[in-house]
Amino acid sequence: MSTITTTTKDLIIIGGGPAGIAGSVYAARKELSTTLITEEIGGQSVVSEGIENWIGTVKISGADLATALRKHLDACKRDVVEVYENERVTALEHEGTIFKVTTGSNKTHYSRAVLIATGASRRKLDIPGAAQFENKGVTYCASCDGPLFSGQDVAVVGGGNAGFETAAQLLAYAKSVTLIHRHKDFKADPVTVAQLLKHPNMRVITHAETIEVRGEKFVTGLIVKDKDTGDITELPVAGIFVEAGVIPNTDFVKDLLAKDATQHLQVDPRTQRASVEGVWASGDCTDELYHQNNIAVGDGVKATEDLYHWIATHTKKS
Ligand SMILES: Cc1cc2nc3c(=O)[nH]c(=O)nc-3n(C[C@H](O)[C@H](O)[C@H](O)COP(=O)(O)OP(=O)(O)OC[C@H]3O[C@@H](n4cnc5c(N)ncnc54)[C@H](O)[C@@H]3O)c2cc1C
């Protein structure tokens, strides 16, 4: 069993998106000795061309938001928050009264408390041809790959906000955009849907299932099944932009913490406490009902306020 030593930090934060950076800024200001371990700083919306609901800023690109988060961290961290970037956490274990975190480069870090802020990653399109044609027409990033499909017909899979945002970006380059949605009603905001449906090059197919990606060297078509009639059609498209939801990055937790059916970490929404004492979780990796930048930041703050009091009353250096 491990014991608390001088190298044991008060806190390890895993993830450098809005939730993890909020936690890091608050931890620095509270003088909690902290290790931040993250694959990158900025989070999921770094690929977004324009975020229009980051409160206090009318419009900001995802890249500029990531830069602002990094600047805030750099301004606060001093020697209180140690940052390990380009590092993936592969395991979290509970050893006695402390936590052990292992990374992909086989380093180990120890702390009294842990804040998990690992967000979520894109759900892959799981149909024949999708993996084979990934980066050969099947793509997960409109702002990165959209210009490659200038003047061509493309499809977007997914009718949530991300799907419509992707379609909006693609309409600037593509000849036509066909959005395919599994359900009859869209999950996206009605204002966004109404705006895009007015565009002459925009088409939508609702209550339909994608069946197969076809191609030779590159994608040439997407097979779609009408869920009402069973009719199968091939959309002649060169690009397929997948916006089929996300999967929380919680695999490294294994069975240590309680998760819901979709692998989100279960937390107490008043405090962000996870199911094991000493662990908090914030942002898109949690079973929080709504996943947004502002919410992730608020969750990160809430967790750090709560864990600060917990650390003060529950643990002592030996
Ligand atoms: C294209 C797009 C556009 C969006 N637009 C908006 C918008 O306009 N407004 C809005 O409010 N929200 C938007 N969102 C949602 C928003 O980005 C998320 O709600 C927010 O990023 C969640 O923050 P987070 O810190 O919880 O997680 P994330 O942003 O996902 O950050 C997770 C962090 O953890 C790191 N990480 C993951 N796993 C590990 C691991 N095992 N080890 C170490 N590090 C790890 C990642 O590298 C990343 O730094 C958008 C999302 C996307 C994809």
Image: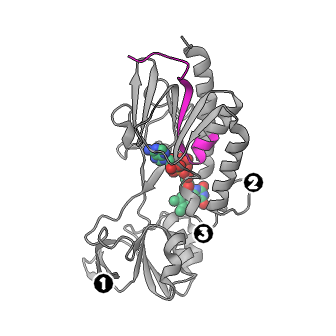
Q: Is residue 24 above or below residue 69?
A: above
78 on left or right of 242: right
Judging from the image, what secondary structure is the residue with disc 2 in? loop
- Residue 234: assigned label: 1
Image position of 38 with respect to 217: above or below: above
Density class for disc 3 (Cα within 10 Å; few <14, some 14-19, many ≥20) is few
Q: Quadrant of the N terminus?
A: top left
Instruction: Count all numbered tags in the image, as a single digit.
Output: 3
As drawn, which residue projects farthest toward the top? 318
CA gap, disc 3 to disc 1?
30 Å
Q: Nearer the viewer, residue 294 or 307?
A: 307
Pointer 3 residue Cβ closer than 8 Å to ligand 1: no
Q: Going from the N terminus, do you reach mark 3 or mark 1 first? A: 3
**Colouring scheme, one of rainbow, by chain, secondary structure, one colour:** one colour
**What percent of the width, then of the height, locates residue 97?**
45, 18
Q: Nearer the viewer, residue 81 or 66?
A: 81
How packed mark 1 is, by other alpha carbons closer than 10 Å (few <14, some 14-19, many 20 or more), is some
Look at the numbered discs 2 and 1 and tell me whether their residues touch, using CB distance below 8 Å: no
Please name the amino acid that badge 2 sits on: Gly
Q: Secondary structure at mark 3?
A: helix
| Residue at 70% from the left image edge and 63% from the top image edge | 59
Answer with mark 2 or mark 1, whichever residue precedes in sequence. 2
The residue to which callout 3 is attached is: 191
Whether residue 46 is in magenta: the answer is: no
Magenta part of the protein: which range?
Answer: 1-22
Q: Amino acid at mark 3?
A: Val
